Image: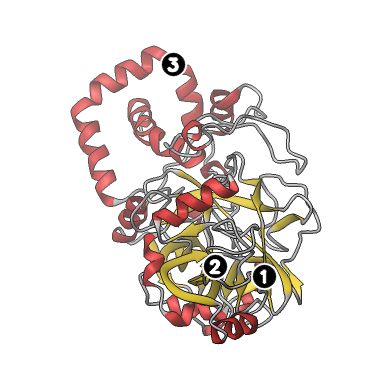
Amino acid sequence: MNKSLRIIALFAILPLFTAGMTTGYFSDAEALKGSGVETSKYGSGTNVCGLQLCSEIPGGKSAWMEEKGKVTPVAPVEEKEMKETMMEKDDSMMEETMMEKDDSMMEEISEKEITEADLGSVLRLSRTNVPATIPMHQGYYNGEDVFYIITDSSDPKHAEIITAKQGWQVELAPLLKNAPEEALSKVYLFTNGIEGDGIHGYQGQVFTSTPAQAEVYSALTSHVHVMWNEGATSRVLDSEVMIMESVENNEITLTEVDVVLNMPQIIWPEGQMMVKEDKTLTDVTPYGGGQVLDIDTEEMNVTFIAHRGWGPDGRTIYYIVTDATPSGPAGMMGVVSSPTSANLIANSAAVDLYQFKNGLTGTGPLGFQPGIAAGAPGDENYSPMWRIFMIGWVAPENAQVLETIDDMNAYKKSGLIDIGIARPMDSDHIVNCPFIDPFQ
């Protein structure tokens, strides 16, 4: 290849190369809006790289590029054809401009030996894992305390009420209303009576199951309003048995409510969520071994690890993990096993989330690049319940960063990746991953 052709080819791959080695075209500033930059006791990095290489590289991105050289990544067919057309139209202009600006540098780069490392086999995002402190609430199960969080609501009114009460955003997830009864557990909410920490300002909610009753427990809850009748003497009812006795005595009235809330339990009578032993967070903190950093029943909050990924259009999202099915992945992640979630595998209350099983090494659940979700907060199809699909590169050594659903579809159409539903332990796989703003 002569000198001019090498220069033209290098110019053509430069945008793809840059995309493969940075966090992508989405805006970190938008994702972190209002968050401020603070020092965390959990050691999470506060350097946001955005569209530039991290400052730890002396001389920044340009110096790194001079040192490393270039590799032609594999691109979808449509993208290759577009680039060939552009080169045919602008061949002479590009050659002249590139030679005038930096002929010596481009000559040096084009002569360097190409290696797999040049492709960037490790994907490094800034602030990949950050602490997210979420308010807890207290309720009851069979007369004992339950501590839980509220992250999502199928109903906008309840989302607004709970957000205002706890001072932390509850996301609207309309699809949760489609969840079948088999995927829900029942919770009683009080609308009058003894004042307390309940959603409506009265006593705490009463649960009908906990993770200790694994076969019936679900973080997704259907709701029954409890109202004390006129003339009845209100008191704390801390079990379903007491509630049913009060109904028989005509002391209270029960009303079913068409709302589903995501209320993962943190502490229950027979146990609690696993707390991670090594609480120091970095951009390469292992995914397994627990998702909780701290549980504080005095301050009434719990601190989760929030993992960074991509929304359907490439926007930055963060999510926590509270429970999953089957038991194998739940154990690996250190979260609650929730077999009832398998009832969502063919239900619209669950949305598709794509994870990677090979390719670029990164901070996804299996050690490769972070995943891509088919929905995100604010979208009509957002849900905290995710049906997991696996993406595999046909030639892992040629893997690039995929950031959007469109990226994924284009590479699948070109035969560069395979996509299949995940079935660990030959079982239906659903994960409760509420998308949150960890900086609120």
**Other residues around mark 2 within 10 Å, as few (<14) / some (14–19) / many (≥20):** many
User: How far apart are labels 2 and 3 at the CA level?
Assistant: 70 Å
Is any atom of residue 394 visible in this view?
Answer: no
For marks 2 and 1, give the one nearer the viewer: 1
Q: Which of 408 and 106 is in front in this view?
A: 408
Three-letter amino acid code at the position of disc 1: Arg
Q: Please tell me the numbered disc located at residue 189.
A: 2
Residue ID for mark 3? 102
Residue ID for mark 1? 235
Q: Please tell me the numbered disc located at residue 95.
A: none
For marks 1 and 3, give the one nearer the viewer: 1
Q: Is mark 3 on a helix, strand or loop?
A: helix
Q: Is mark 2 on a helix, strand or loop?
A: strand
**Other residues around mark 1 within 10 Å, as few (<14) / some (14–19) / many (≥20):** few
User: How far apart are labels 1 and 3 at the CA level?
Assistant: 81 Å
Label 3 near label 1: C-beta < 8 Å?
Answer: no
Sooner in the amino-acid sequence: mark 2 or mark 1: 2
Q: Is residue 99 above or below residue 401?
A: above
